[in-house]
Amino acid sequence: MGSGGVSRRRFMGALAGTAAAVALPACDEAPAPAAPVAAPSTSPGSASPSGPRPLYLGTYTSAEGGGKGVAVASYDPGTGRVTGAGILAELADPSYLAVHPNGRTLYAVNERADGAVTAVRLSDRRVLGSRSTGGQAPCHLSVHPSGRWLLSANYGTGSVAVHPVDASGALGERTDLVTHTGPAPGPGQDGPHAHQIVTTPDGHHVVAVDLGTDTVYTYRLDTTKGTLAEVSRARTRPGAGPRHLTFHPGGRYAYLANEVDNTVAVCAYDPATGRVSVGDAQATGTGEGTSYPAQLVVTENGRYAWLANRGDNSLSRYAVEADGARLRLLGTVPVGGDFPRQLALSPDGGLLFTANQRSGTVSVFRVDEDSGELRRAGEPFASPVAVCALPL
């Protein structure tokens, strides 16, 4: 397995080259809306879903057998059954998706050598435009809770970017780009590889996870200028390859998935300073076979967490103890697909979705929040090169 930025992304999930690019419209251009698909019976982001809800799906358009862009299907929040499929927008390699806090605009990374982020208005599927991330292979993005800033992580060049969001949901020109120039790359790495950027639960800081430097960076976002100022760094053990950090609902602890050494770690977070402290590495329960942890999710009540394991093709189930300070491994559950790349809970917490990249499927589980047990909700739903599932 190559450890460099482009080669590693191609192995783990394919960094697309520019030759097969789908044209990205400029911010003052937009294609005609796609053919309609079944609309949800309630508005996106509704706390009490009734009837079918939308499920948006990311893919690699340039991969063999990949999709045509961001796909949209519907799911039943009671049964978990996924039906229908259409195209929300024909975008290039939309491998990660996020939605604006008001539920009106969807954002996608364009994970290509000339990285970009794109905004799509959900009411009429109009592409509001794309903006350069200033780096290669953006693989993660998130919207600041204020709804005014879009944050993105460039895996290929180890940088994080900030874009302003206007009242329509469209993106403005980039206001900041920070490259992780230190510390030195970890064992087997050729440079920094930013894999995630997310706002802390208290809203005071922004955290970026870098696989290449084995570091979690904390920034303060100037919400007037859209600039990032580093306030602290937290190192994992050398060669851990941290990928994705998930906060406990209590806001004082978080859980770190380490892709390279197949471990997880509990992290303490200090809201006053923004400092993250990484705890000891813990087992994923996948045994000695090759497996790459991808992402953890935590129940809304903060009692259980699940981890996606690519290779072992399982979900590790953890009990969360000591008000979030401890994870206790309970076992693993087969995911029913190949290479579970990403996890997402439905807004009401009743369903867990896994995007299974190599099998081109999305598995759905019913969640028992009292026991942390998962039950498969029917057969996996087919979706070409499924790398992200976003249920609203």
Image (cartoon, grey):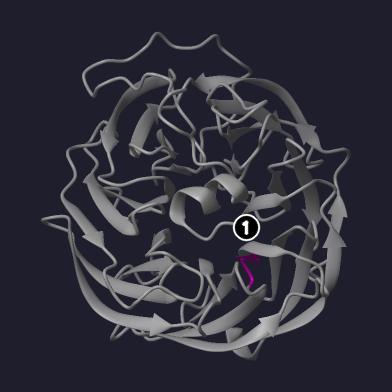
Instruction: Give 205 or 18, whichever is nearer the viewer.
Output: 18
Instruction: Give 371 or 106, whichever is nearer the viewer.
Output: 106
- Residue 82, position as x, y percentages in the image: 75, 32
Q: Would residue 52 be found to the left or right of residue 13 on screen?
A: right
Residue ID for mark 1: 1
Please say whether residue 52 is visible from this viewpoint.
Answer: no
- Which range of residues does the magenta coloring cover? 297-301
| Residue drawn at x 26%, y 69% as measured from the top left | 181
Name the residue furthest left.
Answer: 225
- Residue 215, position as x, y percentages in the image: 41, 76
Locate residue 293: give its quadrant: bottom right
Q: How many marks?
A: 1
- Residue 360, position as x, y percentages in the image: 73, 35
Magenta portion: prevailing SS class = loop
| Residue drawn at x 59%, y 83% as measured from the top left | 324
| Residue drawn at x 40%, y 8% as measured from the top left | 32
Q: Would residue 97 be found to the left or right of residue 203 on screen?
A: right
- Residue 129, position as x, y percentages in the image: 29, 26
